[in-house]
Amino acid sequence: MTDTVANASAGTASSVMPRLKMAGITKRFGPTIALGGVSLAVHAGEVHALIGENGAGKSTLMKALSGAHQADTGAMWIDGQPYQPKSPLDGRDFGVAMIYQELSLAQHLSVMENIVLGDEPRMGPFMRWGEVRRISREALAHVGLEDLPLDTIVSTLSNAQQQLIEIARSMATGAKVLVFDEPTSSLSQHDIENLFTLIRELKAKDYAIVYISHFLEEIQEITDRFTVLRDGQSVGSGVTAEAEVANIIAMMVGRDVKDLYPRSDRVVCERVCEVRNVAGIDKPADVSLELHRGEVVGIAGVVGAGRTEFFRCLFALDSVRSGMIKIETISGNAGGNFTPHQLWDGGVGIVSEDRKREGLATELSIADNLTMASQPFFITPGWQSKACEPWIEKIPIKCASPFQPIDGLSGGNQQKVAIARLLHSNVDILLLDEPTRGIDVGSKAQIYQLIDELASGDPENGIKPKAVLMISSYLPELLGTCDRIGVMCKGKLGAIKAIADVDEHSIMLEATGTEDMQ
Amino acid sequence: MNQKVLKIAGQAGPLIALIFVFGLFAILGGGDFCQWGTMNDILMLSAIVGIAAVGATLIIISGGIDLSVGCTLAAVTIILARLLNLKSGDTYLVEQYPVLWPLCAAIGGIVLGGAIGLLIGAAVVGHIGRAAAVILGGLVIVWLRDGNSMPLVVCILLGIVAGGILWYLNRVTIKKTPLPPFIVTLGLWASLRGAAKWMAGGSAVYADIDEVDGTAIWLNNLMRDIKVGDLILPMPGVWIWIVLAIVIGLMLTYTRFGRHIYAVGSNENTARLCGINVEKTKILTYVVAIGCAGIAGVLRFSWLGMGDPTTDMGTELLVIAAVVIGGASLNGGVGGIGGTIIGTLIIMIVYKGCTVLGLENFVQEIVTGAIIVAAVALDQVRHRKAE
């Protein structure tokens, strides 16, 4: 397999030496083989997609490239020069720069201090501030931020601007190979387009670019060639424009995914939740919706539209400024002044968008995380395993035992635990905030399947359908799973329309607030 | 491979370290170390630090820390001494009720610990008004008692009423500003010591009566043997430690409150998301934990035979070290009572072992300090590996 990749890369650029070449890279962590002989070649002026499920070895390969890990065997060349980085600093000297999904700027320092950080122009122990300004000005010009004051403190900038500064920083250090690791996950649609424009400019300036993303649409839009990794092996590569999405997915998961979004017959039953003109302290501004058993309602919108804030208001994690929330599964609710505890008790459950910081307690076991929202006064291990095992089996969650620490699981399995928590508490209303963010396609498929089952119920066995309210920034997922979709823009939720009446285009127009201009 | 080794070391490590330390001193000290008297001392000293450490384990698992536990012990010894010196008319209460009154005094000491816990907990979760309510209650009791010589029961009731009213008025706080427990208890480390000296009137408080009708008062004998009829119970303090450790250990593992302590320490946001009342859990954790410190204070009184405002300077570090050596993480969410017991024994064997070997006091201190740093360093390494 790996040979074909190497040949394929060599074939397209027979005469030109690739800017970056990696051959036969292997890396073991104890008994697990993270990389089993991966080869990759990226030419100057090429955007190369690295695709694969979580755990396929993308990050390990890129860490070997940046110098954060040392490969066990294999060799790398940059512009034909053998390249063996001992540390990320070493990698930077050779011209390899990483743009991570989590921003890595010093938040309290100024823009220019960040740009020269670690490589400050000095005279003896003294900073040469004139030189710092010149370098920064030049680097910022590359990314279209000529007008940004150099002494702006980084923490006052938006995510998108910070990312641009990170790119500018790699320009300043003389990078030749740029690695973008999930660069769009915290960006709005508008910012993504700006980023793509910038990547195209960098491409024209002969940078070699490695682009890692879970979003195949993005990959089709921005990349020239791709390599698919699975289980530490490269399992395929080619020219992006010639590849079919279905084929790429099949390579990623190693099987055909025919029905990614299953949809059984759903019967809409009684209303369980009513929200009228809810406004939070800052966001959301105005949200109204009704939710019934037996339906999946989606909320689309760009990052920062106030969707998560709405969920936090609904779940009493943030205060509500005005409006009415009525949960009909909780008897005798007057003003809607609940605590999260009452909501769990009353059949409402939430999955957070941020697994690490909010969704899960990573030091604790699967059992502790899964049962955290509803536990009896006395808890025995026997009770815990009895409570967990049905869900571990049914969803399924891949693990050794319910008492395994949760940080040993893959992202997909962690997310399934977060969702199983709702099932354990037997909730009727599921609030899912980005339920498939950053997880592999296989787990995604299982979660879509589960959402469908929950919304359909099983009337024959007396299982009532549940109500699902779901936030997602991934439109194909919303269109695939939901029955009705509303779009949130600048804190306001628009009219909720049946799935038949919307498409990606109309949602994007509404989400970016350009609908009225059309 | 590396991770597996670390995992095993994390679980069995403290026990191996205990055997190693014990073996080391047994070889170096020979017969001087391996004798009943030394073992007795180690167990006795361990009981006091160990009980405080059992409480501190709860606090550290919940993601907090208590730097003022030594001062709590000192304050409790003073309260105990003063309660034992109370007279009803011309006769000492102890003489009238030789069993019951010391028990009341001991409960009073434990309640003082709980009140300090309430104060710290309220401050940590940002209920400044409620922290003030606890202080107000305490001041009312002291003021009524010292200024107006009212009956103690009346003082206490009025103090509780005054504190309770202010506590109730603070039930709704507009915006809470949680304070780092490190800072809260660092402040108390100074203030509480001062308060203890104030309660003591500046110097140690001796108990006026230590025996009634030829029988020693049991409260003074917790660290020796207690005769109950014909039965002799050796080292009651150590038994108290064992029973308390079992009770708290079971609570931590098998009750919802115990699991909530882990949840809050591991990830406060997750706990809140899951409907756990984080503020209540934290406050209750400090109350129970520092209530344990109150019991340690009772034993300290028994050991000293007096109330001493300067006792247990530096005990807080021994306590924290014992918990961390036992495998708890200062980042919260990880730890257990079994480990803490082993950690306490390690610290105390080193402490006593150095004395037996005839090493100077400063050697003890240097070695203890090194062990603390090593334990915390190990904790950090473990934590980083886990990520």
Image: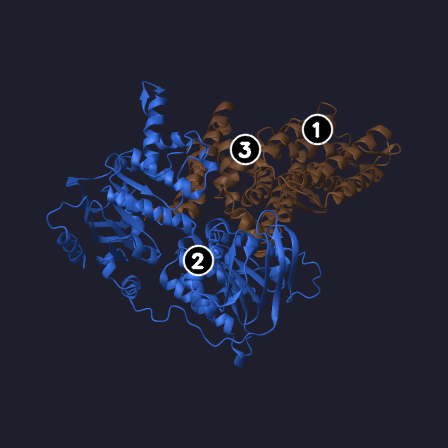
Q: Quadrant of residue A375?
A: bottom right
Furthest-bottom residue in this view: A460
Q: Are marks 1 and 2 in contact (CB under 8 Å)?
A: no
Mark with earlier residue (1, 3): 1
Q: Residues within 10 Å of mark 2 (few under 14, many from 20)?
A: some
Q: Are marks 1 and 3 in contact (CB under 8 Å)?
A: no
Name the front one of labels 1 and 3.
1
Name the front one of labels 1 and 2.
2
On screen, residue B195 versus residue B41, left or right, reads right
Q: Are marks 1 and 2 on the same chain?
A: no
Q: Quadrant of residue A481?
A: bottom left
Q: Are marks 3 and 2 on the same chain?
A: no
Q: Secondary structure at mark 3?
A: helix
* Image quarter hosting the C terminus of chain A: bottom left
Q: Secondary structure at mark 1?
A: helix
Q: Position of residue B181 (x, y in %)?
A: 59, 37
Q: Colour of chain A?
A: blue
* Image quarter hosting the N terminus of chain A: bottom left
Q: Which residue is mark 3?
A: B317
Q: Position of residue A469 (x, y in %)?
A: 53, 63
Q: Which residue is mark 1?
A: B195
Whether residue A99 is visible to the viewer of this picture, yes or no, is yes
| Separation of marks 1 and 3 at Cα, in angstroms | 20 Å
Q: Amino acid at mark 2?
A: Met
Q: Secondary structure at mark 2?
A: helix
Q: Colour of chain B?
A: brown
